[in-house]
Image: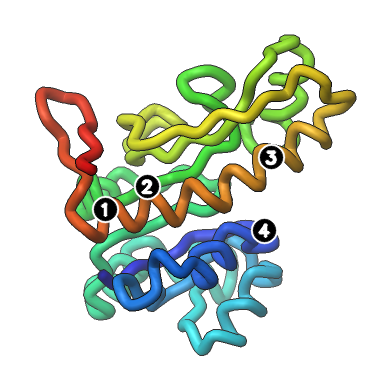
Amino acid sequence: MKIAVFVSGRGTNLKAILDSPKLAGIIEVKAVVSDKAECPAFELAKKNSINIYTVGKKVGFISYEKLQDILFSLKIELIVLAGFLKLIPEELINFYKNRIINIHPALLPSFGGTGMYGINVHKAVFESSAQVSGATVHFVDETYDNGKIIVQKCVDITNVGSPDEIAEKVLKIEHQLLPEAIEKIASGKIKLVNGRVQVLM
């Protein structure tokens, strides 16, 4: 399966995908896309000889329409949002219906939506005094963090002392969960039945 990974930061989830033994031989990362020209994750892409693209309205960036053409020419079958902070345009969502997934650093539907990214999520979780957090992989629709949930994994945060401690624990979970979700999709083990995601064993 040919995939494109969208990133805005360091690319630790991109690294988890590239390093995953589960994904070796069943997926190929053909493109890394960012909304930032100086995205740190681009260095990782270059080391792995992966095409990089910057998308947006800034000078020198490509439009989403042009990006869609590029992804089509690369025969991309799945788009993975791995820390990408921009809302995906409706046209691209419709073109890749149920073929765009996102990883969110909390247990949706709690602690999601506009502004809920990065440390903002972990601060909200910490201040709520929640005893568990985790990560969620979900399909992407037109609203932030709203699409159908594919897989989730929990982590105990009973004794954490700061949002940063939650972030550290959740990131480890993300690095496990995202490759697992991609492997299941690439292996045809994810089905939408009666509006609910079924994960086949």
SS at mark 2? strand
Gap in Å between the C-alphas at discs 4 and 2? 17 Å
CA distance for labels 3 and 1: 25 Å
- Structural crowding at the residue carrying mark 1, measured as other residues with C-alpha within 10 Å and reported as few (<14), some (14–19) or many (≥20): some
Disc 1 residue type (three-letter): Ile
Task: Find the distance from the CA under tag 1 to the CA under tag 2.
Answer: 10 Å
142 sits left or right of 10 in the view: left
Q: Earlier in the sequence, mark 2 or mark 3?
A: 2
Q: Nearer the viewer, mark 3 or mark 1?
A: 1
Tell me, yes or no, whether the two marked residues, 1 and 2, touch with CB atoms within 8 Å.
Answer: yes
Q: Could you tell me if the residues under marks 2 and 3 are in contact, i.e. CB atoms within 8 Å?
A: no
How much space separates mark 2 and mark 3, taking CA atoms?
Answer: 17 Å
Q: Callout 3, which amino acid? A: Gly
Q: Which mark is residue 9?
A: 4
Label 1 secondary element: helix
Per the image, the residue denoted by label 1 is 185
